[in-house]
Image (tube, helix red, strand yellow):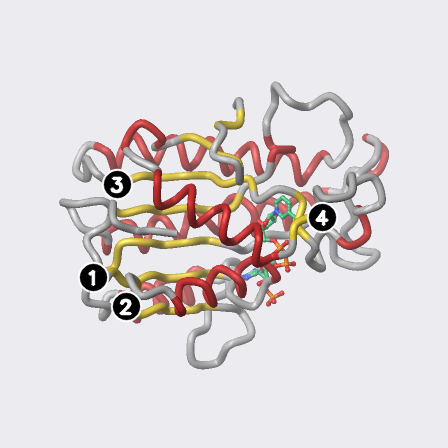
Amino acid sequence: MNFETFETPFDAVVIGASGGIGAAVAEQLQAHPQVGSVLALSRSSPACHIDLSNEATIAAAASQAAKLANLRLVFVATGLLYDGESLQPEKALRALDPAAMGRNFAVNATGPALVLKHFAPLLPRHGKSVFAAISARVGSISDNRLGGWYSYRASKAALNMLLKTAAIELGRTRKDLVVLGLHPGTVNTGLSKPFQSNVDEGRLFTPGQSARYMLEVIAMAGPRHTGRVIAWDGEPVDP
Ligand SMILES: NC(=O)c1ccc[n+]([C@@H]2O[C@H](COP(=O)([O-])OP(=O)(O)OC[C@H]3O[C@@H](n4cnc5c(N)ncnc54)[C@H](OP(=O)(O)O)[C@@H]3O)[C@@H](O)[C@H]2O)c1
């Protein structure tokens, strides 16, 4: 992919770099000749640590990122769908559990919003920059035909609203900033593993494939895309 729409070389931050998709995004950015430094942050890294449920770690990670010379891309690849028995996507209302819902919202919506709070001030006022967070097509209200997955769907819909609202505010001072939600497709990672049986052959992407598609979306995105959710194929996802 070609990042000629950015002032290059540019520096990037990847949050959730231990995840299936996040690791592939960080790797591709690190290998790209138009990218300078990549700060790859994750919950499990002692040196580049971030835990979205702990705002102090987000603030500390932003201080690390402030040292980058030309930060133009913040890519949030964190997310939560299930976690053993205590957190499973709900098939019916009777399965709703406030603690599990709270965890979904904390990681999928509140966490990325706090990343916006601490990292958006680091993005330049002139020239293209992108704040991208991985959302999911199931967060689209108009596309919801199957029901189920209450907390995950709702937390991603909330994420989409947070991104849109931030795009409006930040657009007042940063005309060239693009705030994006991204739908990565269905990707072969730990997060999707138990739910892959209904995926058509050829529609289950490797993390590397999905990362490349999303970085191509980021490379082509401009002000008209800000506040939108864009899928791996460049098509907008209806709210
Ligand atoms: N895979 C798919 O088919 C698919 C489809 C649509 C959307 N998505 C979205 O794509 C994104 C990436 O998912 P993935 O498939 O790559 O899943 P994954 O391999 O499970 O990665 C999830 C990442 O989120 C991190 N994370 C979870 N809670 C965190 C917290 N409190 N603080 C910091 N990091 C935290 C994990 O860190 P640890 O390693 O420390 O646990 C891991 O790096 C998610 O937003 C997901 O909803 C995925």
Q: What x and y, as percent, mark residue 175?
A: 19, 35
Secondary structure beneath dot 1 equals loop
Numbered circle sitting on residue 177: 3
Q: In which quadrant of this rendering is ligand 1 seen?
A: bottom right
Instruction: Specify the amino acid type for callout 4.
Output: Ala
Separation of marks 2 and 4 at Cα, in angstroms: 39 Å
Secondary structure beneath dot 3 equals strand
Rate crowding at label 3 as few (under 14), some (14 to 19) or many (20 or more) other CA atoms within 10 Å.
many
| 39 relative to 229, above or below | below
Say which label, 3 or 2, has the lower sequence index.
Answer: 2
Numbered circle sitting on residue 70: 1
Judge left or right: residue 147 versus residue 235: right
Disc nearest the viewer among 3 and 2: 2
Secondary structure beneath dot 2 equals strand
Q: What x and y, as percent, mark residue 232?
A: 53, 40
Instruction: Specify the amino acid type for callout 2.
Output: Gly
Q: What x and y, as percent, mark residue 211?
A: 52, 53
| 71 relative to 134, above or below | below
Separation of marks 1 and 2 at Cα, in angstroms: 8 Å
Say which label, 3 or 1, has the lower sequence index.
Answer: 1
Q: Are marks 3 and 2 in contact (CB under 8 Å)?
A: no
Name the residue carrying label 2. 36
Q: Are marks 1 and 2 in contact (CB under 8 Å)?
A: yes
Numbered circle sitting on residue 100: 4
Who is closer to the viewer here, 166 or 216?
216
Who's the residue at 34% across and 37% down the image? 221
Q: Residue furthest top?
A: 142
Separation of marks 3 and 2 at Cα, in angstroms: 19 Å
